[in-house]
Amino acid sequence: MTDRQNISIRITDLAPIPLEIYRADEEVYRMAERHVNHMYAEYNQRYKGRSPRELMAMVAFQFAKLYFRGQSTAEKATELLKQFDTELDALLSAQVPRLDDQPPGTSTRREGLR
């Protein structure tokens, strides 16, 4: 069994677009198809008199804007996680003695645990 499959998507009233995709990605492709068509339909109602080309350009711009906003948010989250990790490491190293920092003949284990 192959992990790839052929599907067709329909964007507005254009001819079906054949694609070969990974099976695991089908839901993402179908969701994208639905959202593009939904946004196009909304713009078609809101901006009567605009050409299909103009409407599709507006849809593409909205998705590009969402993509870059998401990318920026992910970058900020990554930076925040790095800062958190650095601060956590500093706190833990201040609280927990390292084994190689122990004086000779001492143990970090409790005597009653032997």
Image: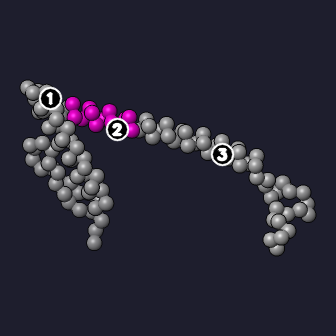
Residue wearing tag 2:
67
* Residue drawn at x 14%, y 37% as measured from the top left: 41
Quickly name the residue at label 1. 46
- Image check: 67 left or right of 84? left
Between circles 2 and 1, the one closer to the viewer is 1
Q: Nearer the viewer, residue 46 or 57?
A: 46
**Secondary structure of residue under mark 1:** helix
Query: Which tag, 2 or 1, sits closer to the chain's start?
Result: 1
Instruction: Check residue 50 for magenta coloring.
Output: no
Judge whether 103 appears above or below 76 on screen: below
Residue 4, given in percent of the width and then of the height, sits at 27, 62
Q: Is residue 71 left or right of residue 36?
A: right
Question: How far, Cα to Cα, is label 2 from label 1?
Answer: 23 Å
Give the residue number, with chain letter if any, for mark 3.
88
- How many marks the image carries: the answer is 3
Residue 81 is situated, as x and y percent measured from the top left of the image, at: 55, 43
Residue appearing at x 37%, y 35% in the figure: 68
Asked whether 95 or 31 is in front, the reply is 95
Rendered residue at 45%/40% (across/down)? 74
Cα–Cα gap, marks 2 and 3: 31 Å
Three-letter amino acid code at disc 1?
A: Arg
Q: Secondary structure at mark 2?
A: helix
Estimate how packed mark 3 is, as few (under 14), some (14 to 19) or many (20 or more) residues with alpha carbons within 10 Å. Answer: few
From mark 3 to mark 1, how far is it between C-alphas?
Answer: 50 Å
Residue interval drawn in magenta: 58-70
Q: Name which of mark 3 and mark 1 comes first in the sequence.
A: 1
Sequence order check: which comes first, mark 2 or mark 3? 2
Chief SS of the magenta region: helix
